[in-house]
Image (tube, rainbow, N blue to C red):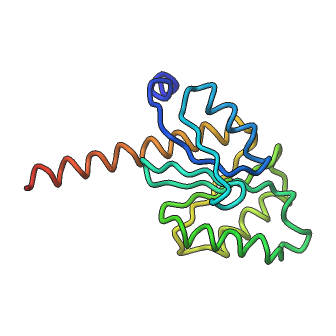
């Protein structure tokens, strides 16, 4: 049922030109979403302008063994500053103890911020998660607009 509604909902997605975004971009294109590639957005990010959401894709291999990758954390912080509805997609094929430790560490570091952290396994999970969230925010925004319009 959810797949049927996702198939009929089409949107514009601004995607960074980083190679990490190529495979999700192909899936989004196959689903007939409008894709715009940009060098002006943060590497490995996806922006859904109509729903006001943005996603940063990070593989768990990008984290060092000590979980102290300051460059990566600075990139995440910059992403949060730019986007008010920001989501961090932590991608790993399998979530073992190390992966859950990294996930927990990232959640704790950004606790209380406007960043939501999601574990994903595959590129299909990345795209599916982004579309579900972007669609939900889009329709929530429309409902708010209708409510404001009725009050006027």
Name the side, left or right, on which 25 lies relative to 31: right
Name the side, left or right, on which 128 lies relative to 91: left
In the rendered image, the quadrant that contains the C terminus is bottom left
Front residue of 96/102: it is 102
Q: Looking at the rendering, which quadrant does residue 93 occupy? A: top right
The residue at the far left in this view is 152
Q: Residue at x 55, y 52 (%)?
A: 47
Q: Residue at x 64, y 52 (%)?
A: 38
Q: How many marks?
A: 0
Q: Residue at x 67, y 68 (%)?
A: 76
Front residue of 82/112: it is 82
Q: In the image, residue 87 lies at what x, y percent?
A: 58, 57
Name the side, left or right, on which 145 lies relative to 124: left
In the rendered image, the vertical position of residue 63 relative to residue 20, given as above or below:
below
In the rendered image, the vertical position of residue 122 relative to residue 65, given as above or below:
above
Q: In the image, residue 120 lies at what x, y percent?
A: 70, 46
Q: Residue at x 55, y 73 (%)?
A: 81
Name the side, left or right, on which 4 lies relative to 37: left
């Amino acid at each position: 049922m959810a797949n049927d509604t996702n198939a009929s909902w089409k949107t514009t997605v601004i995607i960074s030109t980083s190679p990490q975004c190529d495979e999700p971009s192909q899936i989004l294109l196959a689903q007939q979403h409008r894709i715009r590639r940009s060098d002006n957005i943060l590497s490995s990010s996806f922006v859904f302008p109509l729903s006001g959401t943005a996603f940063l894709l990070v593989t768990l291999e990008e984290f060092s063994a000590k979980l102290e990758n300051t460059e990566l954390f600075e990139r995440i912080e910059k992403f949060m500053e730019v986007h008010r509805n920001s989501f961090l997609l932590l991608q790993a094929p399998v979530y073992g103890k190390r992966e859950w430790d990294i996930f927990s560490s990232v959640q704790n570091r950004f606790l209380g911020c406007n960043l939501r952290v999601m574990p994903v396994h595959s590129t299909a999970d990345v795209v599916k998660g982004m579309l579900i969230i972007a669609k939900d925010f889009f329709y929530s925004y429309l409902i708010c607009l209708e409510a404001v319009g009725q009050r006027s």
